[in-house]
Image (cartoon, rainbow, N blue to C red):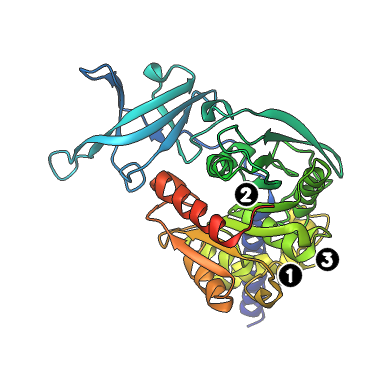
């Protein structure tokens, strides 16, 4: 009898330890900056058609067969190509055959695409400012631990007016500032100066002491420094463009920044508005038991346990829940989101809009990947943002 009791106790301890390890792993995956992605997309063929256009043949999948403009990174990130319209599809033959899709290669920005065998499918159509064809300069933003890099785009002659409105573009979790370049052309059409910024732990701005993501809780301060820079340079008002985590950061600025009265509008693409709901949804899609995911979030939120994830400061996920804090909003917000987003639940955006229909407008696009609404319909995205900003945000 005693042996069986001891066995049950040992088994319970081992199960509890395994659950804690699983929760700790989940917590660390959330806040530890990701390493380089695997080039998991086979490149079947790159060739020229009879008209001399460069084409690329890829395995057909839900993401590679969506209309729009995308990109492929290859050669361990040294190569980049912009991928455009679909020109042919082949369903294959036989039950085991894999279909293919052939798309136009609009640009090769770097690397030898003809020799590439695999790559990474991405929404980063502009790897640098150069393909935009707009005047740009590198600037440095003083932040807590040094200087954060940024790109500044003055209004072009065609769009320049008396407006002193600046657009600050903020990328998402695990991304680089180049991911936010997609919003610059429409801001330029409106006559805005654009500032595309980096923030702590993105590999381009100085890291925090713990080198961990804080899901917007501390990152907003680096973007706040960018707002201060813009105001010092003559901006009279600020429009924030936020992508995913950049949406969280933009919302935190409207709630916490000393300059919040100078922020006049938000354009948010697939924003994370409630981290608890978002992370629990991701855990569910990964088949992680709910109670283990909840334990992982408790680790992140606990001043006594957050060290397990490497955090120097516990996270306050309640303070980052802007659905719950929607009554504090005082400025118009455009939310752009796909109902098929598997990373950031569309239902959270819907709840946010329902809480503040007087201020929040929701526009949907048919993308299948997170933050690729622009890619699925670049012209439609630009038109929606242009029209909304013209109607809801006065020129400064």
Residue 29 visible in rendering: no
User: Please, which residue is most extreme toward the front here?
Assistant: 162
- Dots 3, 2 in contact, CB < 8 A: no
Asked where in the image residue 156 lies, by quadrant, the reply is: top right
Residue for point 65% across, 74% down: 326
User: Which one is earlier in the sequence, the residue at label 3 or at label 2?
Assistant: 2
The structure residue drawn at horizontal position 70% and vertical position 36%, both measured from the top left corner, is 203
Closer-to-camera residue (290/204): 204
Question: Spatial distance from mark 1 to mark 3, Cα to Cα?
Answer: 15 Å
According to the picture, the residue beneath numbered tag 3 turns out to be 303
Where is mark 1, residue-wise?
319
Q: Nearer the viewer, mark 1 or mark 3?
A: 1
Instruction: Tell me if residue 186 can be seen.
Output: yes
Left or right, 9 with reference to 375: right
Q: CA distance from mark 2 to mark 1?
A: 18 Å
Which callout, 2 or 1, points at the residue further toward the start of the chain? 2
In space, the residues marked 3 and 2 are separated at their CA atoms by 23 Å
Closer to viewer: mark 3 or mark 2? 2
Residue named by callout 2 = 173
């Amino acid at each position: 009898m005693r042996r069986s009791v001891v066995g049950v106790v040992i088994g319970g301890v081992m199960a509890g330890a395994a659950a804690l390890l699983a929760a700790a792993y989940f917590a660390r995956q959330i806040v530890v900056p990701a390493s380089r992605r695997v080039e998991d997309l086979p490149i079947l063929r790159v060739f020229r058609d009879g008209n001399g256009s460069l084409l690329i043949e890829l395995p057909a999948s839900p993401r590679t067969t969506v209309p729009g403009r995308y990109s492929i990174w290859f050669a361990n990130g040294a190569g980049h190509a912009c991928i455009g319209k679909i020109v042919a599809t082949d369903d294959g033959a036989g039950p085991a055959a894999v279909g293919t899709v052939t798309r136009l290669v609009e640009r090769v920005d770097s690397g030898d695409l003809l020799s590439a065998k695999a790559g990474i499918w991405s929404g980063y159509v502009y790897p640098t400012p150069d393909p935009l064809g707009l005047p740009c300069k590198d600037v440095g933003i003083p932040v807590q631990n040094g200087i954060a890099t940024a790109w500044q785009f003055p209004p072009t002659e065609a769009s320049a007016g008396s407006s002193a409105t600046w657009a600050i573009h903020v990328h998402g979790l695990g991304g680089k500032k180049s991911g936010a370049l997609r919003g610059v052309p429409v801001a330029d059409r409106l006559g805005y100066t654009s500032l595309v910024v980096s923030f702590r732990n993105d590999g381009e701005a100085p890291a925090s002491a713990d080198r961990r993501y804080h899901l917007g809780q501390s990152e907003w301060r680096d973007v706040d420094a960018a707002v201060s820079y813009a105001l010092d340079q003559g901006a009279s008002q600020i429009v924030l463009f936020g992508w995913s985590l950049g949406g969280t950061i933009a919302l935190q600025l409207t709630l916490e920044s000393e300059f919040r009265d100078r922020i006049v509008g938000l354009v948010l693409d697939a924003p994370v508005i409630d981290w608890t709901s978002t992370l629990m949804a991701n855990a569910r899609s990964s088949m992680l038991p709910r109670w283990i995911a909840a334990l992982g979030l408790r680790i992140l939120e606990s001043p006594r346990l957050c060290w397990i994830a490497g955090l120097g400061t516990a996270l306050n996920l309640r303070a980052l829940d802007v659905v719950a804090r929607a009554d504090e909003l005082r400025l118009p917000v455009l939310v752009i989101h796909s109902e098929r987003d598997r990373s950031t639940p569309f239902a959270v955006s819907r709840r946010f809009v329902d809480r503040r229909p007087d201020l929040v407008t929701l526009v949907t696009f048919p993308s299948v990947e997170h933050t690729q609404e622009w890619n699925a319909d670049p012209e439609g995205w630009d038109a929606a943002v242009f029209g909304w900003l013209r109607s809801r945000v006065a020129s400064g």
